[in-house]
Amino acid sequence: MSVFASLVEQLADLLQPVFHASAAAAAIVLFTALVRLLVHPLSRASARGARARAALQPRIAELRRKHAKNPEKLQRAVLDLHAKEKVSPLSGCLPSLLQAPAFFLLYHLFSSSDIGGEPNALLSHRLLSAPLGDRWFDALGAGGVLGGAGLVYMALFALVTGIAVFNYRRSKVSLADSAPLDAPGAGAVARVMPFLSFFTLVTVAVVPLAAALYIVTSTAWSAVERALLYP
């Protein structure tokens, strides 16, 4: 973790002439963008997989008619079709899974009071008036909703809400255009999916501000990426 802390400090030093006291926050945004850039080839592969799955829908519909009275046989036939065409139903999860270590490392870094036996200097950094190691409840206790740190969180919440609304509308359209899913419980999952983006608001509120910046930046990147890759 000390190596990662040094990386954030070095990025902050590079950005300090432009962002001054908020240089560490800018470094986290830059770090997040670099992570997403590294994962982008997998996101493109995931988009190709989604198009391939969409192309299989007419054949899946035929299997659905053929095995309408035998759900277990239908599921096996659909899985065999995906295997034959080398299309993975879970390929879209890989980019998110590969980002998880970076998020948890950042979360742990800004939740620790010391690193390698030394005080964690990163906790002294801020985004405007909000310490990067604090959470929303700390901001409320320090100055309330309209305090300096509270206003930083209000801006983040507004940004996340805008992204969530955008994702909600796209998910509703995507699910309306797609064929019904055959896996058990898939219908319930499909109904919940459009609302998942709004859960990001809760996460932003309860994690350290540094981790919240990672989430907001990554979520914004995903929204733009999906708009370009899934027109």
Image (cartoon, rainbow, N blue to C red):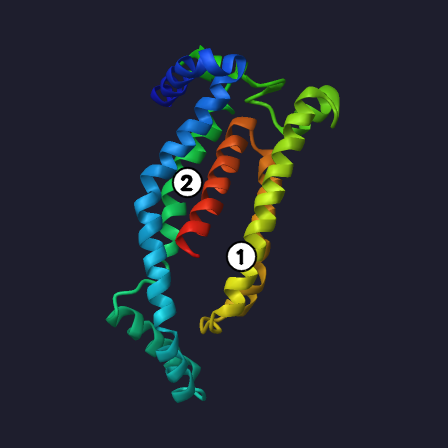
In the figure, is residue 98 to the left or right of 175?
left
Image position, residue 59 (x, y; %): 35, 79
In the image, is residue 17 above or below residue 43?
A: above
Marks 2/1: CA distance?
Answer: 24 Å
Estimate how packed mark 1 is, as few (under 14), some (14 to 19) or many (20 or more) residues with alpha carbons within 10 Å.
some
Estimate how packed mark 2 is, as few (under 14), some (14 to 19) or many (20 or more) residues with alpha carbons within 10 Å.
few
Q: Amino acid at mark 2?
A: Ala
In the image, is residue 128 above or below residue 163?
A: above
**Of helix, strand and loop, which one carries label 2?**
helix
In the image, is residue 47 above or below residue 129?
A: below
In the figure, is residue 123 to the left or right of 54?
right
In the depicted view, which residue is nearer to us: 133 or 117?
Answer: 133
**Of helix, strand and loop, which one carries label 1?**
helix
- Position of the N terminus by quadrant: top left
Disc ID at residue 170: 1
Q: Residue at x 58, y 47 (%)?
A: 164
Q: Residue at x 48, y 17 (%)?
A: 23
Q: Residue at x 38, y 55 (%)?
A: 92
In the figure, is residue 69 to the left or right of 43?
right
In the depicted view, which residue is nearer to us: 74 or 37?
Answer: 37
Q: Nearer the viewer, mark 2 or mark 1?
A: 1
- Position of the C terminus by quadrant: bottom left
Residue 51 shows in the view: yes
Residue 120 shows in the view: no
